[in-house]
Amino acid sequence: MSEVQIKVAKRAVYEDLIQDYVNAERFPNGFSACPRFEEGQTFRAQWPKKPEGFPCDWAWADIQRAVAMIGFGANPPWINRPGTTVICCNDGLRPVTFVVERVEGEGA
């Protein structure tokens, strides 16, 4: 299995959904982008281990299948770069999108 690099590509905020569904009394300041990640942040992983310093267990649970898929050599046909996929956590209000890339020549 190859090592993979996980890069934080984007942090989205869906203001319309937040406005419609977040309890404004409990969260009067609303929600901002996920505070656990920064765009451009990278991590190295070798499945099944969560990368050191990866700050969110929920996000890891959401993306670990993609990490395994890329690490074990898959090339998703909808992605134009071999050894790469794009996946996000399942936070419906402020998801974080990750690019997962196989690190060629290491651990293969």
Image (cartoon, grey):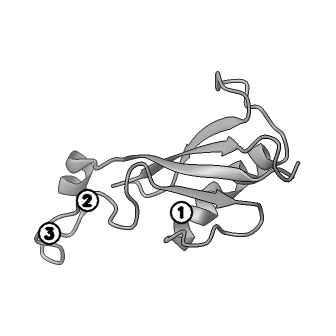
Q: CA distance from mark 1 to mark 3?
A: 25 Å
Q: Residue at point 11% right, 71% down? A: 28
When the figure is inspected, residue 13 is found, relative to residue 76, above or below; the finding is: below
Q: Is residue 13 above or below residue 36?
A: above
In terms of secondary structure, where does tag 2 sit? helix
Quadrant of res 103:
top right
Q: Find numbered disc 1 in the image and state the secondary structure of the residue it sits on.
A: helix
| Crowding near the residue tagged with mark 2, few <14, some 14–19, many ≥20 C-alpha atoms within 10 Å | few
* Rendered location of residue 18, percent (x, y): 23, 56
Label at residue 14: none
Left or right relative to 73: residue 94:
left
Q: Which mark is residue 24?
A: 3
- Judging depth in this view, the residue of 76 and 91 nearest the camera is 76
Q: Residues within 10 Å of mark 3 (few under 14, many from 20)?
A: few
Q: Secondary structure at mark 3?
A: loop
Residue on which disc 2 sits: 21
What residue is disc 1 on?
59
Instruction: Identify which residue is drawn at 60% across, 64% down.
Output: 60
- Residue neighbourhood size for the residue with mark 1, other residues' Cα within 10 Å, grouped as few (<14), some (14–19), many (≥20): some
